[in-house]
Image (cartoon, coloured by chain):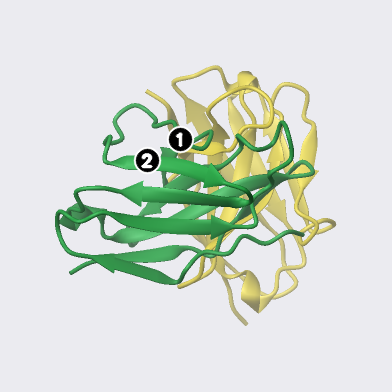
Chain colours: A green, B yellow
Amino acid sequence: QSALTQPASVSGSPGQSITISCSGINSDVGYYKYVSWYQQHPGKAPKFTIYEVNKRPLGVSNRFSGSTSGNTASLTISGLQAEDEAVYYCTSFFSGTWVFGGGTKVTVL
Amino acid sequence: QVQLVQSGAEVKKPGAAVRVSCKASGYTFASYYMHWVRQAPGQGLEWMGRINPDNGGTKYSQKFQGRVKLTRDTSIDTAYLEFTRLRLDDTAVYFCAAAYCGGDCPPSFWGQGTLVTVSS
């Protein structure tokens, strides 16, 4: 089973921009778009934050954006706010199964 | 609005089995795959498998193949996770999550989670 690698932690000050990487995504044609990101606050269910690389579900702030390059996906949070402090997970699709990254703890300083 | 309501917490002994339910409302249950994801205490998310509620077709993570069975009852818009031969390290919160589009789409709408504790 493939693995997705994320940094364990990323931090930034309010108002700054941060980027979280996710390496090892499925970059095959047709599967490239199946990259999603989730935000999870302590004790809560994950929240669908980005899908198909760079699309935002209704209600998600436009401060969240996604991109890919090769086999690495990235989530950028601009104008960092205290409420963005959470753990973020990426996911990609491999041979009919979904794989999550290990998660990145975002700390707002 | 889309809502997934899961059954309550369970405490099981090693070797036992557990069944977790996930009642869907606010959308056409049969149209979107239902995923199951677990999260051990202090750990990350782990995809276990998914079911196509329309025809009952399933796909499982290799890690759980043989111990997990996903089923559904379309008459009551409910999906089930059956997990057998439980071990101590199966203690986790188990989430159901509906896909946002038809076919192989990722989990999007999540249930509240069900804590399963395996303890002797």
Residue at (48%, 63%) from the top-left corner?
A103
Q: Are marks 2 and 1 on the same chain?
A: yes
Residue at (69%, 33%) from the top-left corner?
B72
Residue at (50%, 70%) from the top-left corner?
B43
Image quadrant for the C terminus of chain B? bottom right
Q: Amino acid at mark 2?
A: Ser
Numbered circle sitting on residue A54: 1
For residue B75, say whether it is visible. no
Image quadrant for the N terminus of chain B? top left
Residue at (49%, 19%) from the top-left corner?
B27
Residue, disc 2:
A65
Q: Amino acid at mark 1?
A: Asn
For residue A77, say whether it is visible. yes
Q: Tell me the SS state at disc 1.
A: loop
Q: From the viewer's side, name the closer residue of B61 and A107.
A: A107
Image position, residue B31 (x, y; %): 62, 19
Q: Is residue B100 left or right of residue B12?
A: left
Mark 2 falls within which chain?
A
Image position, residue A89 (x, y; %): 48, 55
Pointers 2 and 1 in contact (CB under 8 A)?
yes
Q: Earlier in the sequence, mark 2 or mark 1?
A: 1
Q: Tell me the SS state at disc 2.
A: strand
Image position, residue A60 (x, y; %): 31, 35
Farthest bottom residue in view: B120
Q: From the viewer's side, name the closer residue of B31 and A21.
A: A21
CA–CA distance in space, label 2 to label 1: 6 Å
Numbered circle sitting on residue B86: none
